């Protein structure tokens, strides 16, 4: 992994805070999205690029291995958190990756206070973790249409059938 990608990965808010302060002080629009990002596919790339287009700095909240297991079961994630973080950090449109252990990123969103929160359109705005924090601080919550028929679970199921 190159140094540029490594410098984008943060394991806690305290390590992200100095960079976030610079970004916020430089009139950037901070965008936050999140997910497990286990087995990156074109749907992930599409949503990351569309999320980045809502602002000038994109922070991706990444469910830690502990969090993914809690949400998806003991056989997940397929790739560990370090590998998933490195892959996300390699994307030009991603400015920072922050890991979180909770089931939702609500706690980290309350610390970041992004200008824009982005999630898939399968969620109603009131169902999106952190929506209240963002809206109460004058930000926006955006939803994206996902690419039909593509999901990590579907890919895993197809692989199992091989």
Image: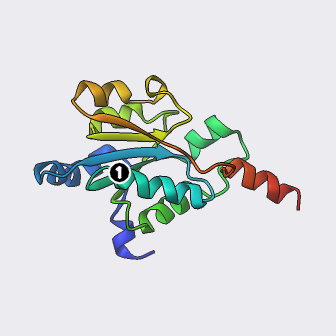
Asked whether 135 or 62 is in front, the reply is 135
Instruction: State the image coordinates of residue 31 (x, y, percent, origin top left).
Output: 32, 47
- Is residue 94 in view? yes
The image's colour scheme reads rainbow
- Is residue 97 in view? no
Total tally of numbered discs in the picture = 1
In the displayed structure, 140 sits above or below 13; it is above
> Which quadrant would residue 134 be assigned to in this image?
top left
Q: Secondary structure at mark 1?
A: strand
The residue under the point 37% across, 28% down is: 131
Instruction: State the image coordinates of residue 136 (x, y, percent, origin top left).
Output: 25, 24
Q: Quadrant of the N terminus?
A: bottom left
Label 1 CA crowd tier, 10 Å (few <14, some 14–19, many 20+): many
Q: Quadrant of the C terminus?
A: bottom right
Extreme residue toward the bottom, this view: 2
Instruction: State the image coordinates of residue 158 (x, y, percent, origin top left).
Output: 81, 56
- Would residue 141 be found to the left or right of residue 80 on screen? left
Instruction: State the image coordinates of residue 66 (x, y, percent, origin top left).
Output: 57, 42
The residue under the point 33% across, 65% down is: 7
The residue under the point 88% across, 56% down is: 161
Name the residue that disc number 1 marks: 59
- Would residue 21 be found to the left or right of residue 6 on screen? left
Asked whether 117 or 2 is in front, the reply is 117
The residue under the point 37% across, 63% down is: 93
């Amino acid at each position: 992994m190159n140094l540029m990608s490594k410098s984008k990965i943060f394991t806690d808010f305290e390590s992200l805070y100095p960079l976030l302060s610079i970004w916020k002080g430089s009139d950037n629009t901070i965008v936050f999205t999140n997910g497990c990002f286990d087995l990156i596919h074109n749907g992930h790339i599409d949503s990351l690029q569309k999320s980045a287009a809502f602002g000038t700095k994109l922070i991706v909240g990444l469910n830690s291995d502990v969090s993914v297991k809690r949400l998806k079961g003991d056989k997940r994630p397929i790739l560990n958190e370090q590998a998933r973080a490195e892959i996300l950090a390699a994307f030009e449109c991603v400015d920072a990756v922050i890991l979180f252990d909770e089931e939702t990123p609500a706690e980290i969103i309350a610390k970041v206070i992004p200008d824009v929160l982005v999630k898939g359109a399968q969620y109603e705005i009131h169902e999106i973790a952190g929506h209240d924090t963002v809206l109460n601080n004058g930000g926006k919550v955006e939803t994206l249409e996902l690419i039909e028929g593509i999901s990590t679970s579907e890919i895993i199921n197809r692989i199992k059938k091989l």
